[in-house]
Each structure stands twice: as structure tokens, then as C-alpha cells.
Amino acid sequence: MVIVIDALRADHLPFYGYPKNTAPFLNRLSQKSSVFLHAYSAATWTSPAVGSLLTSLYPFQHRVTGGNLADITREEGKRSLLVSAIAESITTMAEVLKKCGYRTFGMSSNFLISQSFGYAKGFDYFHNFRMKTDARFLHAKLAKWEKELHKGPYHLYIHYTDVHVPYRRRAPWYHREENRRADIISAYDSNIHYVDAEISALYEWLGWEYDTIIIVTADHGEELWDHGYRGHGRNLFDGTLRVPLLVFLPKGGSTVRLIKPNVSQVDILPTLCDYLGQKPDPQFEGRSLLPAMRGNSEYLAGRPIYAHLERGPYRFRAILRDRWKLIMTPEGDPGWLFNLETDPGEKKNLAMSSREAGRKREMADLYREFEAKSRKYEQKLVPLKASRKQLEQLKALGYIH
């Protein structure tokens, strides 16, 4: 069971230290789960991030980087988009779990996580709502699959967009604030409350407590004016790159609750394989997190993990190693270097510090060498005809401008 809550910041959850209990159910679940304190997306917008989660490949490998989604072209008087998709040659999470004997179900209310772009690969049942939709509508559709769900072991991927812009003001959790920033954050938090309540109901309905692996994460976070703007997909700062990662294993399968070393979305699929006793596919870049959940996380120390962003004019690369983080541009600009141990808010850029010149060079070289030598797949581009209403929602969601 993989739950993705689109645009959910880790630090707006109580088990990551947020002072408000925005997620009572997930907070209770976290008490008997492993929580990864420093989990990172592979990108800061949906298409490449989910591509990495489902394939254990980084975006510059699976090549789902958006195509020309930021631009609208005209073809015979009709608007169309050209969008990158998961190639047929890439193995996905659903394909792996199907081979393990699981029936596979996928559901998404994000326009981009759809059959058209390859995200349904390996699913026996898959539904995309094509428009931003409340969690209760996803669950109503899921209820129609109930008989199929009960026929045997199953894997479910469910992708919620309630926390994504535009934010609804959800009663009774929303409280109006006079300050505009505080008011928008109150609205954002109210949607976390809402989807948490819906997940709680789903948990009870499907009886996940005893025999279900539950993974809760986000495709990316959300900047709330941390670096001067609200949204995501414009940079690789932690407001959008850091994500929650909670893993519940049934029957006390994990012994460590809080795990500190850096981990990535690309680790989720290898972890599932390890738990099921399956040899990971050689294409996977991630590592199993099961040893860390059972008390040994030393193997994660010093490990570099990577992130990538190519979305319209926003083009950045990042590497994290322990508590150090380097963000670069492809053009070789000075970039940003942060010590996240002493500067978790990424306010003090050390990229130009002569004292850290060696560290910056070493991290940049690690990134460039890995990107240059890593296995890469062909980029598949899919033309998409979209209605005016769908284009308007894509604009409201921030995918086109």
C-alpha cells in the first residue's frame, strides 16, 4: 500500500515537529511505524518525482522530465501539449509486485499521473480522475473495486491532491487569519487534516492494521514563502525537496521508529522487494531501507543522493551527503551550498566560502560523475490534446503558465 499526498511538506506534520496536530491519524500510525526524518524527493514537481518513486531511477535516467509541458502549442486550431512518459523498457513498482503475486490497483486525482503517461504500467486496475478531486471521490471509486480487492493479496497505489494548490478552506479545521500568509497556511493545513481523516476511514474500511505494509509519502513538498514564493517546481530547496516518509510493517516488522540518515524516494521500491524476499532489479538506484528499520542504518551514512529539476526556465541539480547539500545549475553558476545541521532553513549560502571550496568541488564532481555514467533510458514523448477546462486546471495547479 503506497499513499502519496501531493505537495505535502514533512515539517507540517506533527511527527516531524509541527506544533499543530494536522494529522491525528497519521500521528498515531507513526507511533508504530518507522519515520525517516530526512527523506527527499528526486524532483520538486509531480511527473519526474512519481516517475522516480515507481521506478527507483532518478529523473535524468527515466527521462520523465515534462517535455514541453510549460508551453502550449497550437495544432490545427486546437491546443495540445507534448509530455514525457515512462518508457516501455522501464520496470515499474506495479510490474514488480504483480510478478510477486499481487493484484495491482492504482488511483490518482493528479492529471499527470495517468495512463497516457505510462503510470498505469503493471496495474490490473487503474483510474485517473483527470481533474483535481477530493479524497472522498477516490474512495467512492475504490469502493466499486471492493470485490476485486478481496479476491487475494493486493497492492494499492493511491495519489491524493487535496493538499495541492488551489487550497480549499476545509471546515472545521480552517481558521481565518488576518495576515495573508498565515491565512493561506491555515488553508493548507486544513487540507492535511481533511486527507488525514479520509485515510483514517480508508484504513478502517479495508482493515489494514494487521497484514498490510503501509507507506505514506509525498511526491514533493511546497514552498510557503521560505525563499520568497509559494508553490513548487521552481527550485530544489528543502521546502519542496524534503518529503515525509512513514513505513508501517505489520506484526512489529520494524524496531526503529526515528531514522536520521538521508534517504530518497528511489529507496521505496527496493525496500518493498527486500521485505517480500525478492532480488531487486539491476536497474534500481535505490537501496532497501529494511536494515535501517531493524536497527542498522550505518550503511546509509556518507551515501550521496540526487535530485533534478528541468521545468521551463527552472533548471537545477542537487546532491545531498549526510547533512551537506549542494544545488547547482547546468551552466556552472556558483549555486548554493548548505550545512543542514546548522542551517536547516537554508539561509546561509556557503558556495562562495573558500573554507568549503574543497567540499563543494568534491560534491559537484560526485554528481557529474554519477549523472554521466548512470544508466539512461530513452525519452518517450506523448502528444496530449487537452480541453480548455483541463488547461485551465493545469494552469491553476501551476503546471502551465
Image (spheres, helix red, strand yellow):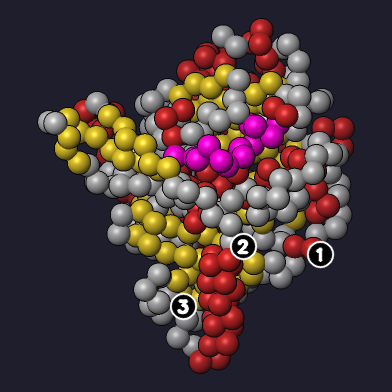
**Quadrant of image for the N terminus:** top right
Dot 2 or dot 1: first in sequence order is 1
Magenta range is: 85-97
Q: Nearer the viewer, mark 2 or mark 1?
A: 2
Q: Position of residue 379 (x, y in %)?
A: 44, 47
Crowd class of label 2 (few under 14; some 14 to 19; many from 20; radius 10 Å): many
Whether residue 221 can be seen here: no
Three-letter amino acid code of the residue under disc 2: Ile
Residue sitting at 52 percent across and 14 percent down? 141
Dot 2 or dot 3: first in sequence order is 2
- Residue under circle 2? 305
Three-letter amino acid code of the residue under disc 1: Glu
Question: Helix, strand or loop at disc 1?
Answer: helix
Crowd class of label 3 (few under 14; some 14 to 19; many from 20; radius 10 Å): some
Marks 2 and 3 sit apart, C-alpha to C-alpha, by: 20 Å
Marks 2 and 1 sit apart, C-alpha to C-alpha, by: 15 Å
Residue 298 is tagged as 1
Marks 3 and 1 sit apart, C-alpha to C-alpha, by: 29 Å
Q: Is residue 351 left or right of residue 370?
A: left
Question: Helix, strand or loop at disc 3?
Answer: loop
Q: Position of residue 382 (x, y in %)?
A: 37, 37
Dot 3 or dot 1: first in sequence order is 1
Question: Helix, strand or loop at disc 2?
Answer: strand
Three-letter amino acid code of the residue under disc 3: Asn
Residue sitting at 81 percent across and 26 percent down? 211
Residue sitting at 41 percent across and 60 percent down? 235
Q: Nearer the viewer, mark 3 or mark 1?
A: 1
Up-down: is 193 above or below 219? above
Q: Position of residue 101 (x, y in %)?
A: 76, 24
Nearer to us in this view, 371 or 349: 371
Please tell me whether residue 249 belongs to the stretch shown in magenta. Answer: no
Q: Nearer the viewer, mark 2 or mark 3?
A: 2
